Image (cartoon, rainbow, N blue to C red):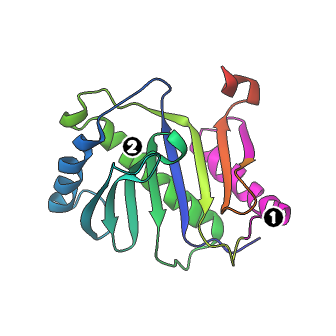
Amino acid sequence: MVKVQHVAVKVFVERGVTVDLVEAIPVFHRWIRERTVPEILIDVADYRHVSNGPGVVLIGFEADYALDQTKGELGLLYRRKQVDTAGPVEQLRQACRRALVACRRLAVEPEFKGQLRFDEGCWEVIFNDRLLVPNTSESYEAVAGPLRAVFSELWGGAEVWLERVGDPRERLTVRLRRGSPLAAAT
């Protein structure tokens, strides 16, 4: 198994959902004041002006949260920045849990008035360290088992469909869907 550090997970919003990302700014500032998440939070950065970019980012010491619109796909991105001594499966599990809790909390914030809905059956996992996890077939095969284990657990034993996405020059990115590939296409 490859060493997992600096992992990022993205939970996509449901198809057809659009929100004004400016609404995330007061929400994220409130999360800092109220210490809503377990990490130390520092600031909010507004990148809405960047087309298909990072959106609005809640910057933390150990991790960042963002309403991210990279590649034109809106979702909540959780990015671990600090090295953890836990094993790879536990690191993936922790990142997924933090992202899921943030999605559910964000969806009920008054600023979004129930308009923000996440597709908890469609995620991306980005391995943010090209030295430890190069974007190769070997790395993909090494992370596929732990990803299946974590997402099968997260999805209550449902079938986990994995797909390596992106350009080989980019970070290793795996798209995960609950159920079969045919179910994901509908």
The mark that comes first in sequence, 2 or 1, is 2
Asked if residue 170 lies in the magenta stretch, the reply is no
Q: Residues within 10 Å of mark 1 (few under 14, many from 20)?
A: some
Q: Position of residue 160 (x, y in %)?
A: 71, 40
Asked if residue 135 lies in the magenta stretch, the reply is yes
Q: Position of residue 168 (x, y in %)?
A: 76, 59
- Camera-side residue: 87 or 71? 71
Please give left or right for residue 142 compared with residue 175 in the image. right
Of circles 2 and 1, the one toward us is: 1
The residue depicted at 54 percent of the width and 70 percent of the height is 6
Q: Quadrant of the C terminus?
A: top right
Distance between mark 2 and mark 1 Cα atoms = 30 Å
Q: Reply above or below: 115 against 64.
A: above
* SS for dot 2: helix
**In this picture, which residue range is highlighted in magenta?**
134-163
Q: Reply above or below: 70 against 93.
A: above
- What amino acid does circle 2 point to? Cys
Please tell me whether the stretch drawn in magenta is mainly helix, strand or loop. helix
Q: Which mark is residue 103?
A: 2
Q: Which residue is mark 1?
A: 136
Q: Are marks 2 and 1 in contact (CB under 8 Å)?
A: no
- What amino acid does circle 1 point to? Thr
Please give left or right for residue 47 compared with residue 127 in the image. left
Q: Is residue 32 visible?
A: yes
Q: Position of residue 51 (x, y in %)?
A: 43, 46
The residue depicted at 73 percent of the width and 39 percent of the height is 161
